[in-house]
Amino acid sequence: MYHDPEFPALRRAYRSFGAVSVLLSVGGFLSYVLLSSFAPALMNLELFGRLTLGLTLGLVQFVVMGLAAWRYVRHMRERVDPIVLRLRAQQREREQQQARVPSGRRFGAW
C-alpha cells in the first residue's frame, strides 16, 4: 500500500491541512493569552456597555475552534476519505487474490 502513487498524496493532504489548522488555532489562542498578559489595558477596552475586547476575543475562541472542527470534517470527507476508501478496496483485493493462490502445504493452527 505504501508504494501506491495515491499514498503520498494522502499523506500530503492530511499533513498540510493539519499543520495549517493547528498553526492558526494555536496561534490565535496564543495571541489571546499574550495580549491578556502583556496588554491588559487593550483587553479591558470597553466595546459595548460592560463587554470588553478581552471578553469578546475569548468568546471568539469558541467560534474559531468550532470552525476549525467543521473545516477538518469537511476536508477529510472531500479529500482524504475518498483516497482512503480506494486504498482499502485495493488492499482487500490484494488480500483476496493472495488467499486464492495456494502456496504449498498449509498447516492449521493447533
Image (cartoon, helix red, strand yellow):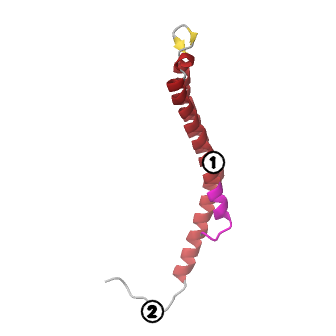
Callout 1: few (<14), some (14-19), or many (20+) C-alpha neighbours within 10 Å?
A: some
Q: Quadrant of the N terminus?
A: bottom right
Q: Which mark is residue 32?
A: none
At x 55%, y 26%, the residue is: 35
* Residue 14 rendering spot, x and y as whole percentages: 61, 53
Callout 2: few (<14), some (14-19), or many (20+) C-alpha neighbours within 10 Å?
A: few
- Against 51, residue 96 (above or below) is below
* Comes first in the chain, label 2 or label 1: 1
Work out which residue is located at the far bottom of the displayed protein and give it. Answer: 104
Work out which residue is located at the far left of the displayed protein and give it. Answer: 110
Image side of residue 15 versus residue 103, left or right: right
The amino acid sitting under disc 1 is Phe
- Against 108, residue 21 (above or below) is above
| Residue where numbered disc 2 is placed | 105
Q: Which mark is residue 17?
A: 1
Residue segment shown in magenta = 2-12
Q: Nearer the viewer, mark 2 or mark 1?
A: 1
* Residue 85 rendering spot, x and y as whole percentages: 60, 60
Q: Quadrant of residue 105?
A: bottom left
